Image (cartoon, helix red, strand yellow):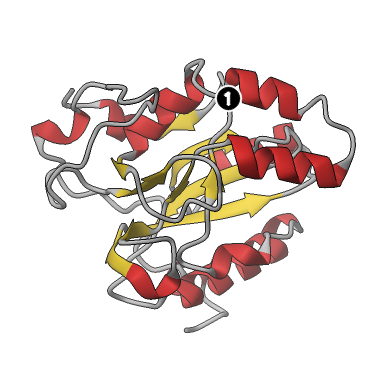
Amino acid sequence: METNNTSSRINGINANSKPAEIPNQYGFPMQTFGGAPISPLVPIYDCVPQFSFFKAPITNVQPYSRATLRQIYNAVKGNYYKEQTDKLRTITDPKQARIFKAQNFDYCTFSGIFTKRSDNALLKHSKLLCLDFDNINIKTLRFQLLTDEYLNTQLLFVSPSGTGLKWIITVDANAHTHADYFNAVANYLKQTYNVEVDKSGKDISRACFLPYDPYAYINPYHLINR
């Protein structure tokens, strides 16, 4: 992939691109099942994009359901994960914090639907890429990402620790590989904003823990056609 041409390197995700029409059933109402703020399995093409949702702990690699960006947005903004998030941010020992997070936070694999959480078990790519930023100036980077000239934010929220951001954008999975897109976007962000992306995001089945963030952002396009 070319590295000297930003729009070419991140083809399909520039600020002028127009998303495809979303069917009316995309925005089906939020539901809970066994305490999980995610709807049950739905046909793979009914809602676009879809990805796998997993119940805690992280050792559970079998998906609980499929989810959409709108559902995750509702869950993160709601009170579903407030207790876990508040508790995690009181833990000062890094090792204990990692253990608590792994045991108590639901998570999803934004980049696709999987039969289990493994790069080799991908059923369908969601055409989404999740990038993770740790120990950054949240206010500054949030503004930069939301106003970026080339990359359209689909979902953005503060990480469970409260010191980073989770950023979900659109990619064209048919044009380049997942790893190619990750490398291109990571390089672009480093050159443009001097910010490092967590390299673990290169894994297509990378787990993203879901915290409480009342100020989470979603592209307004996902809120239409309820």
Residue 192 in the image, given as x and y percentages of width and height:
68, 59
Which secondary structure lies at badge 1?
loop
Q: Say whether residue 144 is visible.
A: no
Q: Residue furthest top?
A: 79
Residue under the point 58% across and 24% down: 213
Q: Is residue 50 left or right of residue 159?
A: left
In terms of depth relative to the viewer, which is nearer, 183 or 107? 107
Report the number of numbered marks: 1
Residue 109 in the image, given as x and y percentages of width and height:
43, 53
Q: In this view, does 67 lie to the left or right of 168?
A: left
Residue 22 in the image, given as x and y percentages of width and height:
16, 41
Residue 33 in the image, given as x and y percentages of width and height:
30, 25
User: Compared with residue 75, is residue 152 higher up or lower down, i.e. above or below?
Assistant: below
Residue under the point 22% across and 26% down: 224
Q: Which residue lies furthest to the bottom in this view?
A: 1
Mark 1 surroundings: few (<14), some (14-19) or many (≥20) residues within 10 A: many
Residue under the point 38% across and 68% down: 11
Q: In this view, does 186 lie to the left or right of 90?
A: left
According to the picture, the residue beneath numbered tag 1 turns out to be 212
Q: Quadrant of the C terminus?
A: top left
